[in-house]
Image: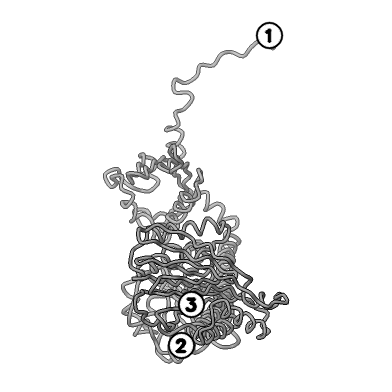
């Protein structure tokens, strides 16, 4: 009887056991790649070349040699994914994408990679595998092709709608149309947006195709173009073949003929029964659009229409408010003998977010000059109106030669009596250009900054009082009293006054931002105009959405 409790007979193992990773990858139709970011070279082993349907002699390590294997939309999507991963500092990256095989047929492929970083955290290599995913996705599509297509298109609409919710201008809307994670997944080679202006359609973007046709920038609504037809009929226009493009729109055909375009969808953008624009999408495929595709595209057009109208209203309101504020500011700065001046103003960027920042330069008798800069609370047209009233009041008080403290006290009473529930910060400086003496009064505003002739900078510690309006409301029995600080502006020195919009940055300590401004002034150009431009370029792009005003005075 055999001994059933004994050990099993030893089985000899193959000489190549366990299999080398290269063999495992090759048998499973997987290849490896190594992309050196510093040199730009991308190494592909033979199995990887086979997955991409490339012969060894056709590839020299330059990623550009893969351009004819990647459709434009896929190349753009992969570029976006890689750029985002490198920026975010992630270490893993994966993506499905299509390649065009030698016979022109599309083939689904999958890549999985690891991003390696150097000792300082900078990405320098991407190492991974690439494999054929055609069978995998074909099986999935066979089980749920319709559901997957529905999810994909629905995802496009959801992603686009989410992005459009934050659009505050027409430019923001056009940027969404170019987003690879939004409309890029529709497979369109071009996304166009036209806006109705009078009896014409103005093309504001040509999306991802980057094909600019000057003749089509403005077209009449009654012209024989698909965009015009969609506006006239207020119904979507679907074109399913190149022959239909040629026969139905002979004026457009010369511009379509050189493109890889075989179908198109033109969606009127309608709000409250009125067309405000039209969206055009061009596709490389032949054939009709399914009912589900048409429904989702119409839904997409509705979202874009609503966002476009909101953005247009924002821009109109912003233009109105900005125009009002510009009308309230001085139209020109007078020439001051013995001094140089420079002023800059930039409004907030969204909707009615135009506030009450102002500046003024007032010539006074006896070689003196008055400087005012201030900021009315709030960001709307009311703030701009109050700003204009305050500015003219201060101009009148100083023209009557009231002392600086009295001028601000009277302005505070005026603002309180206007009953606007607003307050304003302000700094008033009276400069004697003969002696250089400065009389400074500050009402809740930032201190002035003085740049000396040798380039060094110092904040002038100015005694301050409550903002205008509040000082009148809380004035004691003795009335409003603003302290006056004296200083000297020497020859070759520059005095800087600004509103907090130039330095305030959400999430950043104001003291740190003031130090940044001080350093920018110290290292800035000597010319006042050039210095003002430099400060707005350097600091203005870093701050939040607030008005910014700047006034510079230099004594010769």
Q: Which residue is mark 2?
A: 197
Between residue 172 and residue 532, name the one nearer to us.
532
Q: Are marks 3 and 2 in contact (CB under 8 Å)?
A: no
SS at badge 2 = strand
What separation in Å lies between label 3 and label 2 (alpha carbons)?
37 Å
SS at badge 1 = loop
Name the spot of residue 141 as percent of width and height, x first. Answer: 55, 56
Sequence-wise, the earlier of marks 3 and 2 is 2
SS at badge 3 = strand
Q: Which residue is mark 3?
A: 359
Side of 1 relative to 487 (left or right): right
Sequence-wise, the earlier of marks 1 and 3 is 1
Tell me the quarter of the picture where residue 431 sits.
bottom left
Instruction: Give the answer, above or below, for where 113 lies relative to 361.
Output: above
Q: Which residue is mark 1?
A: 3
Asked if one can make out residue 543 in the rendered structure from this viewpoint, the answer is: yes
Asked if one can make out residue 294 in the rendered structure from this viewpoint, the answer is: no
Q: Are marks 1 and 3 in contact (CB under 8 Å)?
A: no
User: For the N terminus, which image quadrant?
Assistant: top right
Between residue 379 and residue 109, name the one nearer to us.
379
Name the spot of residue 167 as percent of width and height, x first. Answer: 54, 71
């Amino acid at each position: 009887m055999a001994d059933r409790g004994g050990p099993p007979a030893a089985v000899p193992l193959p000489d190549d056991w366990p299999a080398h990773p290269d063999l495992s990858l090759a048998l499973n139709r997987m290849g490896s790649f190594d992309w050196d970011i510093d040199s730009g070279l991308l190494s592909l082993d033979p199995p990887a070349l086979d997955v991409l349907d490339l012969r060894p002699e056709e590839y020299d390590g330059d990623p550009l040699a893969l351009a004819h294997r990647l459709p434009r939309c896929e190349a753009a999507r992969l570029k976006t994914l890689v750029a985002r991963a490198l920026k975010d500092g992630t270490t893993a990256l994966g993506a499905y994408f299509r390649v065009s095989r030698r016979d022109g047929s599309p083939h689904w492929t999958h890549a999985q990679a690891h991003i390696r970083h150097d000792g300082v955290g900078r990405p320098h290599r991407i190492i991974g595998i690439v494999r054929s995913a055609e069978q995998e996705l074909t099986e999935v599509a066979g089980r749920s092709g319709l559901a997957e297509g529905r999810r994909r298109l629905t995802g496009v609409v959801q992603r686009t709608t989410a992005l459009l919710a934050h659009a505050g201008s027409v430019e923001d809307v056009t940027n969404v149309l170019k987003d690879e994670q939004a409309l890029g997944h529709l497979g369109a080679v071009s996304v166009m947006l036209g806006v109705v202006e009078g009896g014409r359609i103005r093309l504001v973007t040509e999306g991802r195709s980057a094909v600019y046709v000057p003749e089509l920038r403005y077209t009449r609504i009654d012209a024989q173009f698909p965009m015009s037809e969609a506006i006239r009929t207020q119904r979507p226009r679907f074109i399913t073949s190149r022959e239909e493009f040629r026969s139905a729109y002979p004026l457009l055909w010369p511009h379509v003929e050189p493109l890889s375009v075989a179908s198109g969808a033109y969606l009127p953008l309608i709000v409250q029964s009125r067309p405000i624009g039209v969206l055009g999408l061009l596709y490389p495929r032949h054939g009709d659009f399914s009912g589900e595709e048409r429904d989702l595209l119409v839904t997409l057009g509705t979202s874009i229409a609503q966002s476009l109208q909101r953005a247009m209203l924002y821009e109109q309101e912003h233009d109105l408010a900005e125009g009002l504020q510009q009308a309230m500011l001085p139209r020109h700065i007078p020439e001051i003998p013995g001094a140089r001046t420079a002023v800059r103003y930039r409004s907030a960027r969204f909707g009615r977010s135009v506030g009450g920042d102002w500046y003024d330069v007032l010539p006074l008798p006896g070689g003196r000059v008055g400087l005012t800069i201030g900021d009315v609370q709030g960001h709307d047209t009311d703030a701009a109106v109050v700003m204009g009233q305050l500015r003219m009041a201060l101009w009148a008080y100083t023209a009557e030669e009231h002392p600086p403290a009295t001028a601000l006290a009277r302005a505070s009473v005026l603002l309180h009596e206007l009953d606007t529930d607003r307050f304003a910060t302000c700094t008033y400086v009276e400069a004697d250009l003969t002696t250089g003496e400065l009389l400074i009064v500050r009402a809740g505003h930032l201190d002035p900054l003085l740049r000396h002739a040798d380039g060094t900078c110092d904040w002038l510690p100015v005694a301050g009082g409550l903002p205008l309006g509040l000082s009148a409301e809380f004035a004691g029995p003795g009335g409003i009293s603003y302290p006056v600080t004296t200083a000297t502006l020497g020859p070759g020195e520059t005095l800087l006054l600004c509103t907090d919009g130039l330095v305030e940055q959400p999430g950043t300590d104001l003291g740190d931002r003031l130090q940044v401004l001080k350093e920018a002034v110290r290292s800035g150009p000597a010319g006042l105009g050039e210095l003002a431009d430099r400060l707005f370029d350097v600091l203005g792009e870093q701050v939040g959405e607030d008005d910014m005003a700047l006034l510079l005075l230099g004594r010769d």
